[in-house]
Amino acid sequence: MTIFSKIISGEIPCNKVLENDNFLAFHDINPKAPVHILIIPKVTVANFQEVSPETMVGMTTFIHEVAKLLGLDQSGYRLITNNGNDGGQEVMHLHFHLLGGAKLSWNHLSDSDSKNFL
Ligand code: AMP
């Protein structure tokens, strides 16, 4: 069982942003941007390579809702999913990183230090 499954079941708390029957959005515990949200499906699926197109339909709508809720639909954002070992995926439950709140450079993630913006 991954840590995100425990967050979905309520066993581990999270700083929730939005939830519906199928998806959950919460703040990343180690933010890499002024706004760093994780968006996950409640169904257990390892990563993007494993997800069904049907789940991604709902996921897309949900990500749009989270972006609107936080005003990122206007200011812009970056959406990332790390897939598997070479992609740097640490938690094997599909998640999208929604990053925003500042103009992000292309190499932002490699040199970002939360002390600089939090
Ligand atoms: P990835 O490397 O794409 O698998 O990203 C995993 C992300 O999960 C990292 O950005 C972590 O900071 C984040 N993370 C791990 N545990 C928690 C937690 N309990 N609550 C919120 N975010 C978490």
Image (cartoon, rainbow, N blue to C red):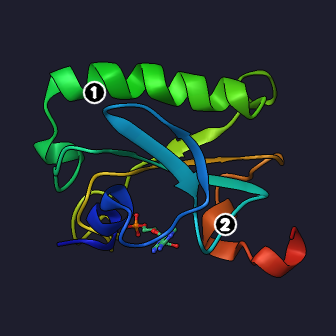
Q: Where is residue 38 drawn, in percent x and y? A: 50, 53
Residue type at numbered disc 2: Lys
Q: Secondary structure at mark 2?
A: loop
Task: Decide: few, some or many residues near mark 2? Use Cα within 10 Å; few <14, some 14-19, many ≥20.
Answer: many
Is ligand 1 within 8 Å of the beta carbon of the residue shown at mark 2?
yes
The residue drawn where x is 59% and y is 72% is: 29
Q: Which residue is mark 1?
A: 56
> Can you say whether 51 is above or below 107 in the image?
above
**Mark 2 lies on residue:** 32
Residue at image coords 73%, 60%: 33
Q: The disc labelled 1 sits on which kind of residue?
A: Met
Verify CB contact (< 8 Å) between mark 1 and mark 2.
Answer: no
Q: Say which label, 1 or 2, has the lower sequence index.
A: 2
Residue that extends furthest to the front in the rendered view of this protein: 10
Residue occupying the point 83% across, 48% down: 102
**Depth check: 13 or 115 in front?**
13
Residue at coordinates 33% horizontally, 22% vertically from top-left? 58
Residue 97 seen anywhere in this rendered image of the structure: no
Say left or right for 42 vs 28. Answer: left
